[in-house]
Image (spheres, helix red, strand yellow):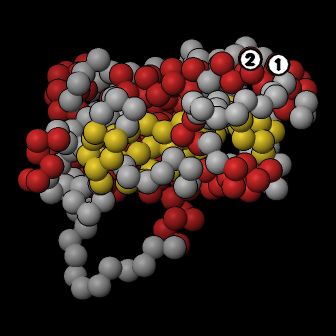
Amino acid sequence: MDIVALFCDLDDFYQAFAPAWQKHLLPAPGRHRRRPCRLSTSEIMTLAVAFQTSPCRTFKHFYLAEVCRHWRTEFPHLVSYQRLIECLPSVLVPLAAYLQTRLGTTHGIAFIDSLPLPVCHNRRIGSHRVFAGVAQRARSSMDWFYGLKLHFVINEKGELLAFRLTPGNVDDRTPVPDLAATLWGKLFGDRGYLSQELCEQLQQTGVQLITKLKRRMKNKLMPLLDKLLLRKRVLIESVGEQLKHVCQIAHTRHRRLHNASVHLLAALAAYTWHEHKPSLHLSEEECELLAKSF
C-alpha cells in the first residue's frame, strides 16, 4: 500500500468533510479540556488503515517498531503510543464516512455472506466486559462463538458494496433488505439465506435472491447460467478470508468499544485499497446481460 497516496486521499476527503461535520456537532455540557493532538485527524486515520495491511499482529508493535523507527519523515509530529490510543475514537465518524466513499458500484451481480467476529475466547465469556450488552453467543458453520457478525455484499469484482454489523445471534436474513436497498439484478447467497418470504420481498425491489437448496427439499429448475454463477459464490468467501487474515478484522485483544469500531472500519477501508481483489473477470456489459436473463 502506498502510504503517501493513502494519506492524500484521506486528507482530501477530511478537508471537505470536516466543515459539514462540525456544523452538526452539539456542544458538550459542562467544561471539558480539549487538548489537540499533534497528529492531525488525517494522519491518525492513515495509521489506523495502514496497520491493517502490515505484517505486525498488534497495533502497539506496528506503531513503536515500524512507524516510530521508519516513518518519522512522513509523520514528523509523532506522539506517544498511549496518547495515540486516546485519540483513536476521534476518527470514528470521519472513518465511517470515508468508507462510504470507497464502496463499489453494482453491475447486476452481487454476492452476500456473513463473517463471525468473536471478541473473546469461549472460556472467558463470563468475565468479558468490553462488549457486554453488545456481543451475543451464536453458532457459526465451524463452532460456537461469542461476538458480532459482519454482514457484507460484494460485486463481481470483489468490491465492497454494503455492510452491516449485528450481534452474533442475529439471523443472516434479517439485515438483507437493508443491504440490498441499492442493488438490482441477482444476489447469490448460501443456504442460510433461503426464505420464500425474503425472496418475494426482494423481488419487489428488482433483486432476485438465488441460493442452493437444503437437503430433502424438492428440486427446482434453475437456468444454467445461474447455476454456474452460484458456484462462484466462493468469491465472497475469499474476501472474508482476506478480511480475517490480511486485514486482521477479527481478534480478541480489544479493550475499548470505540477503538474496536475504529479497527473494524479501518480494516474494511484497507481492503478497498487492495489492488488484487478476487474477481470473476467479467465486463460490465456481460454482467448486465447475465443480470437481465431472468
Measuring 81% from the left and 39% from the top, which residue is drawn there?
A: 185
Circle 1: residue type: Leu
Q: Where is residue 119 in the image (x, y as percent from the top left)?
A: 24, 43
Q: What residue sits 29% from the left and 17% below the top?
A: 55
Is residue 204 or residue 195 the one in the foreground?
195
The kind of secondary structure element at disc 1 is helix
Vertical relation: 240 (above or below) 112 = above
Residue at screen point 82% across, 19% down? 224
Q: Residues within 10 Å of mark 1 (few under 14, many from 20)?
A: few
- Mark 1 and mark 2 in contact (Cβ < 8 Å)? yes
Furthest-bottom residue in this view: 30
Secondary structure at numbered mark 2? helix
Residue 65 spot, x, y in % from top left: 17, 22
Q: Name the residue under label 2.
A: 228
Mark 2–mark 1 Cα distance, whole angstroms, equals: 6 Å
User: Which residue is the site of mark 1?
Assistant: 224
Quadrant in the picture for residue 142: top left
Residue name at image x 82 percent, y 28 percent: 221
- In the rendering, which numbered label is found on residue 253? none
User: Which quadrant: the C terminus?
Assistant: top right
